[in-house]
Image: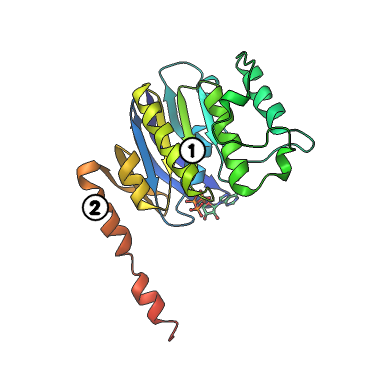
């Protein structure tokens, strides 16, 4: 279980996260939604231990870093490292032995190719494969569907269902509401750094309407098209 209590995050004088309180249980898939700049990535980086913050993030399963797989929006790879070497590196970090990477290559990636030469979607799929092979208990996925082709989107959906079945904690962000409806048990609407609404599946429509009602029509009118 992950407990986030009174989480505040500042970049200089600018407050980016304001009094975030959330609980993530095993077997739950949580979606975090919000406009660009709402603070989703900052929240994920804070949970992943990549940012300092005020407040507490507790994990009942021990050191959170040893159980977590974090998928960044734009995964970065060292130069001159092949896809296979990258996966090997991640497995080594968790003492996981894999003899045949071909059968683990669910996205059919060119594993002998340098990872830095992969396309955006391929990079995302490689990074996701890596954290899956690590057998983590927690998956923090920043826009896992973004930039990924339709077939792979379907695979990711199936992976998420499997992770839920395996009692993992999954937290993800997406701007595509239809995928969130399908995969998430709970949604949290982050607006200007605050959670303004948390909902279970029965109330996802309310969050979608609230987001749509955030004045976009008025802004477009101001363009005088
Ligand atoms: N390293 C940084 N230094 C200063 N400000 C930052 C830094 N990283 C993020 N911010 C600011 O924090 C706010 C939240 O950014 P964040 O990337 O968390 O938003 P987001 O919800 O993930 O957006 P998006 O949907 O575009 O990915 C933004 O105003 C952003 O400019």
**Residue 144 visible in image:** no
Q: Secondary structure at mark 2?
A: helix
Whole-number angstrom distance, CA of label 2 to CA of label 1:
22 Å
**Image check: 78 left or right of 161?**
right
Colour scheme of the picture: rainbow
Q: Secondary structure at mark 1?
A: strand
Q: Report the front residue among 116 and 170.
A: 116
Q: Earlier in the sequence, mark 2 or mark 1?
A: 1
Give the residue furthest to the bottom: 224
Please rate how many residues cluster around mark 2, counting C-alpha atoms within 10 Å: few if below 14, some from 14 to 19, many from 20.
few
**Residue 35 visible in image:** yes
**Image check: 224 left or right of 66?**
left
- Whole-percent x, y for residue 39 in the image: 47, 49
**Image check: 162 left or right of 120?**
left
- Whole-percent x, y for residue 14 in the image: 52, 53
x 62%, y 20%: residue: 91
Mark 2–mark 1 CB contact (< 8 Å): no
Query: Which residue is disc 1 drawn over?
Result: 141
x 25%, y 43%: residue: 199
Location of residue 214 by image quarter: bottom left
Task: Give the numbered dot on residue 175.
Answer: none
x 76%, y 33%: residue: 81
- Whole-percent x, y for residue 151 in the image: 48, 44
- Whole-percent x, y for residue 49 in the image: 55, 31
> With respect to residue 115, does 166 lie above or below?
above
Task: Give the numbered dot on residue 205.
Answer: 2
Location of residue 166 by image quarter: top left
x 44%, y 29%: residue: 57
Give the residue furthest to the right: 80
């Amino acid at each position: 279980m992950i407990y986030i209590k009174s989480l505040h995050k500042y970049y200089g004088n600018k407050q980016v996260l304001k009094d975030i309180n959330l609980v993530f249980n095993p077997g739950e898939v949580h979606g975090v939604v919000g406009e660009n700049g709402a603070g989703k990535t900052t929240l994920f980086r804070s949970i992943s231990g990549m940012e300092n913050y005020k407040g507490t993030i507790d994990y009942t399963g021990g050191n959170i870093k040893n159980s977590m797989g974090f998928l960044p929006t734009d995964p970065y790879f060292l130069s001159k490292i092949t896809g296979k070497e990258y996966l090997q590196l991640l497995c080594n970090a968790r003492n996981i032995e894999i003899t045949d990477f071909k059968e683990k290559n669910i996205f059919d990636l060119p594993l002998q190719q340098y990872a830095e030469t992969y396309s955006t979607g391929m990079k995302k799929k490689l990074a996701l494969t890596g954290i899956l092979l690590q057998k983590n208990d927690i998956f923090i996925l920043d826009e896992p569907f973004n930039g990924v082709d339709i077939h792979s989107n379907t695979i990711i959906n199936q992976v998420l269902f499997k992770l839920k079945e395996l009692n993992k904690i999954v937290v993800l962000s997406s701007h595509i509401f239809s995928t969130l409806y399908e995969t998430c048990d709970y949604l949290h609407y982050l607006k200007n750094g605050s959670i303004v609404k948390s909902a279970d599946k029965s109330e996802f429509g309310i969050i979608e309407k609230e987001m749509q009602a955030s004045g976009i029509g008025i802004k477009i009118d101001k363009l005088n098209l």
